[in-house]
Image (cartoon, grey):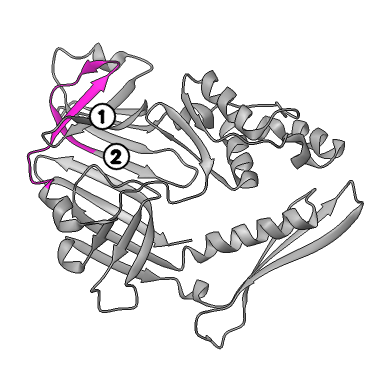
Amino acid sequence: MPMRAAALAASSVRAPRLDALLNGVALAGVIDAEVSSVGHYAADRFRLRVALSANAASLWAQAPMAIELRLSLGSGWVSLVQGNVDRLDIDPIRHEVELEGRDLTASLIEARTQEAFINQTSSEIATLLAGRHGLSANVTPTSVPVGRYYQSEHSSITLGQFARATTEWDLLIYLAQREGFEVWVQGSTLYFNPVSIGSTIGVSLSPSDCIDLRLSRALTLARDISVVVKSWNSRQKQAFTETAQQSAASGSGQPALTYVYVMPNLTPADALARAQQILAELSQHERNVDITMPGELALAPRAPVTLFNTGTDFDGTYEIASVTRRLSERGGFVQTVRAKTLA
């Protein structure tokens, strides 16, 4: 059951405390911090601003820099992000240091691969790649060897030929899409599981519960939509086209918006499944909700958020796409939640 925002906000009025660890050592003089958690095949990002002290020059000369940001609202510490610093800026006039980086997804994003893993399943590959980067694996077992996805020896050769431009993260995304899974990293764990609204913790919101609430609609996506997938199957030696369509809830009087994708070596059934998947993803972006609210530690991407009493037809349940939490001495602890139409 989603909880009311009033209850969420009440738990956030306690003075928040931020703990920043750099290579395992606590950082003093934190000025402000921001952590953006996303739910769509991307790395979480963080930004941290710290006072520059005269005796900490050796601290900023370290490489690499591993960061963990933890936050407490008075009842224990919750890890917001673990990752490495990508960029370090020192301002000797204002006596500040700013650090920016990504969570541990970055290690997979930066790892190039030329492996095809023909005889292994998607779940075996996900577990293997997690282990390579020191990550735990929360993986739902799959049974189909990925070689079947390549459809023929031609596709296997093609994969190897172009693998120099492929990363381990790209491979995991490809496999997740073929399996109907999601893939993400949280803390030091790689998750590879079926698509769902994975969190049981949601929230019900009315405008009075929010600091700011913006409701937006992409009118181009409110039209009839058609997704066309064209493919050439080298085993069957034939070309074919599959189409998925969705009609607008109310007639717009405009011609259908058509998206065309060319994807090699699919079967007709696979091409139709991909067209339907793309159509569902496009439809989710018709309505977007941006909520600014008191900071808390429960909500996460893929959780539900229900709007009511907006006085519009935006009332309903959405899926959280991202949560950005900001903590500063001046602004306190607030968060921005972006949600999209429920799939």
Q: Three-letter amino acid code at disc 2?
A: Val
Residue 41 position, x and y percent, is: 50, 43
* Image point (47%, 19%), residue name: 134
Judge whether 96 appears above or below 60 on screen. Answer: below
Circle 1 residue: 69
* Label 2 neighbour load within 10 Å: few <14, some 14-19, many 20+: many
Q: Answer above or below: position of 145 versus 227.
A: above
**Which residue range is magenta in the image?**
11-33
Residue 324, disc:
none
Q: Quadrant of the N terminus?
A: bottom left
Instruction: Tell whether position 6 is magenta.
Output: no
Which residue is found at the position 40% from the left and 26% from the top?
Answer: 188
Image quadrant where residue 293 sits: bottom left
Residue name at image x 60 percent, y 32 percent: 123
Circles 2 and 1 in contact, beta carbons < 8 Å:
yes
Direction from residue 327 to residue 156 in the image, left or right? right
Quadrant of residue 48 in the image? top left
* Residue 323 against residue 282 in the figure, above or below: above
The local crowd at label 1, few if under 14, some if 14 to 19, many if 20 or more residues have their Cα within 10 Å, is many
List x then y, in percent, for residue 260: 69, 64
**Residue that mark 2 sits on:** 35
Secondary structure beneath label 2: strand
Q: Is residue 233 left or right of residue 192?
A: right
